[in-house]
Image (cartoon, helix red, strand yellow):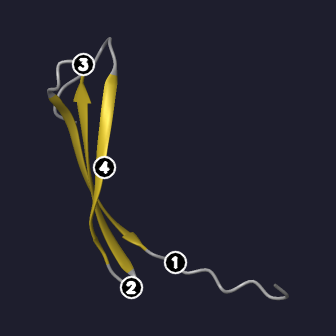
Amino acid sequence: FLRAVRTGRIAARALVKNAGRTLGLIECDVLDADGKLVAHAVSTCMILRAAPAEGR
């Protein structure tokens, strides 16, 4: 977190920076009502593939 937001609306913008076969990299910015950056997050996520459904 970069700064506190006590009142007003906030907005989040997320972007998938890279999506490979097993890993994904995501960045997210949170902005206050004035458009000032209040938080920034970066996440690396494991991508799990579901097995195909049987009997369909």
Q: CA distance from mark 1 to mark 2?
A: 9 Å
Q: CA distance from mark 2 to mark 3?
A: 37 Å
Position of 9 with respect to 34 (left or right) is right
Viewer-closest of 47 and 53: 53
Compared with residue 11, is residue 34 higher up or lower down, i.e. above or below?
above
The residue tagged 4 is 14
Q: CA distance from mark 4 to mark 3?
A: 17 Å
* For marks 1 and 4 on the same chain, the one whose residue lies earlier in the sequence: 4
The residue tagged 2 is 21
Q: Of helix, strand and loop, which one carries label 3?
A: loop
The residue tagged 3 is 33
Residue drawn at x 23%, y 30% is 31
Q: Position of residue 49 (x, y in %)?
A: 55, 81
Q: CA distance from mark 4 to mark 2?
A: 20 Å
Give me the disc on residue 48: 1
Compared with residue 46, is residue 43 higher up or lower down, i.e. above or below?
above
Q: Of helix, strand and loop, which one carries label 1?
A: loop
